[in-house]
């Protein structure tokens, strides 16, 4: 609880909660490693969502291992649980709720980085302090939509960071129900989508009547559906 308070009060940029040990400083788990980061709020802690989260991270680790080759060490994967609210006017989540989400992720074997900010570029800048190896984000389509809606066009390197050469985004499929629920109220574009058995992949997603925007944002991220 104390460590979560430190992050919330911005006395610590991040804290690591491994699934199989006590919390450790992030430098001990990030140093010189290829990384897969799964950022999100992880508000749904039921078994079905927990299984999806676990598959998403495992799939991304496997994808990056394939890019690096079998001779390289296995990438480290972390759920990046953010404390920042969806809306800047909203309050930060209560610490007991944060700990409940951490426990749910750790219970399924996931290691958790608790971070204060929600922007991808802040996470990139943070991990780049400790590693120069490739960094990959794996996100559900709702977070991809949020990242691509051009909120960070004035930043060097756009929404990843000025060090974005080593960073890419893997886009993980979502159910239609979860996707529509997640983007309701924040999306500024009219996103069209198709589905396969109730699931939507990155290839089935596009902004309606804004193909010029889609061409622009597609050049900023490498998306891989799993």
Image: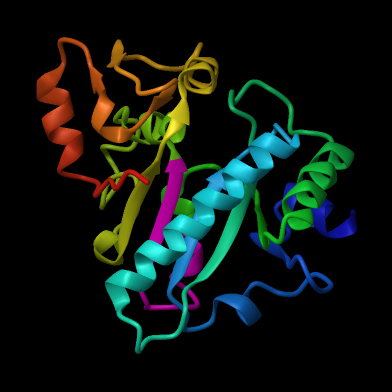
What's the magenta region?
A: 124-139
Name the residue: 52% across, 16% down.
Answer: 177
Give the side of residue 19 with respect to residue 196, left or right: right
Disc tally is 0
Task: From this view, report whether residue 29 is shown above or below residue 14.
Answer: below
The structure residue drawn at horizontal position 34% and vertical position 32%, both measured from the top left corner, is: 201
Residue 133 is a magenta residue? yes
Where residue 104 sits in the image (x, y, percent)? 78, 47
Q: Is residue 91 visible?
A: yes
The answer to which image quadrant residue 111 occupies is bottom right
Task: Please tell me which residue lies in front, 140 or 135.
Answer: 140
Relative placement, left or right, of 121 versus 8 is left
Colouring mode (rainbow / by chain / secondary structure / one colour): rainbow
Residue occupying image coordinates x 59% and y 27%: 86
What residue is at 34 percent from the left and 20 percent from the top? Answer: 195
In the image, 111 versus 125, the foreground residue is 111
Q: Position of residue 103 (x, y in %)?
A: 82, 51
Vertical relation: 198 (above or below) 97:
above
Q: Relative to 209, is 106 on the left or the right?
A: right
Which residue is at the far bottom? 71
Position of residue 198 measured from the top left corner of the image (x, y, whole percent): 44, 20
Residue 92 magenta-highlighted: no
């Amino acid at each position: 609880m104390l460590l979560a308070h430190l992050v919330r009060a911005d006395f610590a940029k991040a804290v690591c909660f491994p699934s199989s040990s006590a919390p450790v400083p992030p430098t001990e788990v990030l140093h010189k490693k290829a990384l897969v980061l799964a950022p999100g709020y992880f508000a749904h802690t039921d078994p079905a969502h927990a299984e999806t989260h676990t598959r998403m991270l495992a799939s991304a680790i496997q994808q990056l291992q394939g890019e690096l080759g079998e001779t390289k060490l296995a990438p480290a994967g972390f759920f990046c649980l953010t404390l920042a609210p969806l809306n800047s006017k909203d309050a930060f989540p209560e610490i007991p709720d944060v700990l409940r989400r951490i426990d749910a992720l750790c219970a399924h074997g996931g290691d958790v980085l608790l971070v204060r900010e929600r922007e991808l570029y802040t996470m990139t800048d943070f991990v780049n302090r400790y590693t120069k190896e490739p960094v990959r984000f794996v996100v559900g389509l709702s977070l991809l939509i949020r990242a691509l809606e051009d909120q960070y066009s004035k930043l060097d390197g756009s929404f990843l960071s000025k060090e974005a050469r080593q960073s890419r985004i893997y886009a993980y499929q979502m159910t239609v129900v979860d996707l529509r629920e997640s983007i309701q109220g924040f999306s500024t574009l009219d996103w069209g989508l198709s589905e396969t058995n109730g699931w939507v992949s990155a290839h089935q997603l596009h902004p309606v009547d804004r193909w010029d925007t889609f061409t622009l944002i597609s050049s900023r991220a490498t998306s891989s559906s799993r």
